[in-house]
């Protein structure tokens, strides 16, 4: 962990809602005039799109039906740990982009499904912001979690996560239900062993649960809306958290445990603003020697 060069890490699996959480952070950074170095988790995948297809086929041929982006074999976790360590020490480090589509290809000058070359992070940033699958991962070989100053977990309950993934992959990527189901099954081993444990390392977890029936996500016609959801917010260390203030400010919220508050799904942005803004400002005060 670093005072001069803090790191904020957002961890969540595919379709968990980390992108919308990132937008909330961007609003806070813009309002508070914080200069940020952004790093995307998929830029630390080991293989580009075509290479991953070949690696999966080879793994399947060897009898490994669980090879996925969720696990360490398909990622450069050592390089990610090095980036966090180096940024915490010096405020710089090596990063790259993964090009998702034609729009990004036009901006990044690399074909979809490929990586841009490695380069140095922008100079003179206030903090590093990571959003991806492995921002709090700990294995026998690496410990990324120890270098992050604020770790946030973003995860829906499992059936809701599957509903979101099914709808996204079918509607925006053109996959069949059967293909998405196969992906879910292939990822399950790594999800259990490498994704779930990270949420015990995080400082704050935001977990969304539906208040409508999602018992069979494979036939769900729509994703439950924020009005049809609640969010459980769990603090790893509740000391110093003003729960009475949060319950007062967030209509319809209540405490479910001594370290947890439940809010209506449509109040997530407000809750994040109230909870995260003071923590970001505290990191900036420490950085500037004011705390």
Image: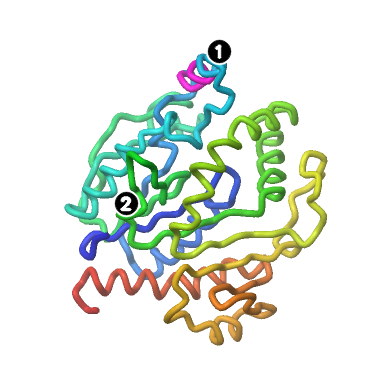
Say if 20 sits above or below 14 in the image.
Answer: below
Along the line of sight, the residue nearer the viewer: 152 or 290: 152
Disc 1: which residue: 61
The residue range painted magenta reads: 51-56
Q: Earlier in the sequence, mark 2 or mark 1?
A: 2
The colour style of the image is rainbow
Say if 272 sits above or below 213 in the image.
Answer: below
Q: Which mark is residue 283?
A: none
Label 2 vs label 1, nearer the camera? 1
- Tell me the quarter of the picture where residue 74 sits: top left
> Residue 278 placed where, x, y %?
40, 75
Say if 38 sits above or below 105 in the image.
Answer: below
Disc 2: which residue: 37
Along the line of sight, the residue nearer the viewer: 112 or 275: 275
As measured in the structure, the alpha-carbon distance from the residue carrying label 2 to the one carrying label 1 is 40 Å
The local crowd at label 1, few if under 14, some if 14 to 19, many if 20 or more residues have their Cα within 10 Å, is: few
Instruction: Pick the quarter of the image with the C terminus.
Output: bottom left
Callout 2 touching callout 1 (CB < 8 Å): no
SS category of the residue bearing label 1: helix
For the stretch drawn in magenta, what is the main secondary structure? Answer: helix
- Tell me the quarter of the picture where residue 174 sits: top right
Would residue 128 be seen by someone viewing this image from the given angle?
yes
Residue found at x 52% / y 57%: 21
Would residue 106 be seen by someone viewing this image from the given angle?
no
> Residue 242 placed where, x, y %?
49, 83
Along the line of sight, the residue nearer the viewer: 278 or 198: 198
């Amino acid at each position: 962990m670093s005072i001069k060069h803090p790191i904020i890490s957002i961890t969540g699996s595919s379709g968990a809602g980390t992108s919308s959480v990132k937008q909330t952070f961007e609003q806070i950074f813009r309002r508070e005039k914080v200069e940020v170095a952004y790093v995307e988790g998929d830029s630390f995948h080991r293989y580009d799109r075509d290479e991953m297809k070949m690696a999966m086929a080879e793994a399947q041929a060897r009898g490994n039906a669980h090879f996925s982006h969720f696990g360490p074999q398909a990622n450069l976790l050592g390089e990610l740990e090095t980036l966090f360590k180096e940024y915490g020490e010096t405020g710089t480090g090596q990063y790259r982009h993964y090009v998702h589509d034609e729009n990004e290809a036009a901006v990044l000058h690399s074909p979809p499904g490929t990586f841009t070359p490695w380069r140095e992070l922008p100079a003179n940033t206030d903090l590093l912001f990571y959003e991806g699958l492995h921002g709090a991962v700990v294995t026998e070989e690496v410990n990324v979690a120890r270098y992050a100053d604020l770790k946030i977990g973003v995860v829906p309950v499992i059936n809701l996560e599957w509903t979101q993934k099914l709808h996204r992959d079918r509607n925006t990527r053109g996959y069949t239900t059967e293909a998405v189901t196969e992906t879910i099954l292939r990822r399950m081993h790594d999800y259990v062993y490498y994704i779930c444990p990270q949420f015990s390392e995080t400082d704050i977890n935001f977990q969304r649960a539906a208040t409508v029936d999602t018992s069979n996500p494979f036939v769900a016609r729509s994703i439950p809306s924020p009005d049809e959801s609640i969010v459980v917010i769990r603090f790893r260390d509740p000391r110093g958290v003003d729960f009475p203030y949060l319950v007062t400010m967030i209509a319809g919220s209540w405490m479910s445990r001594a370290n947890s508050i439940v809010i209506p799904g449509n109040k997530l942005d407000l809750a994040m603003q109230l909870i995260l803004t003071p923590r970001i400002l505290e990191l900036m005060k420490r950085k500037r020697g004011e705390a």
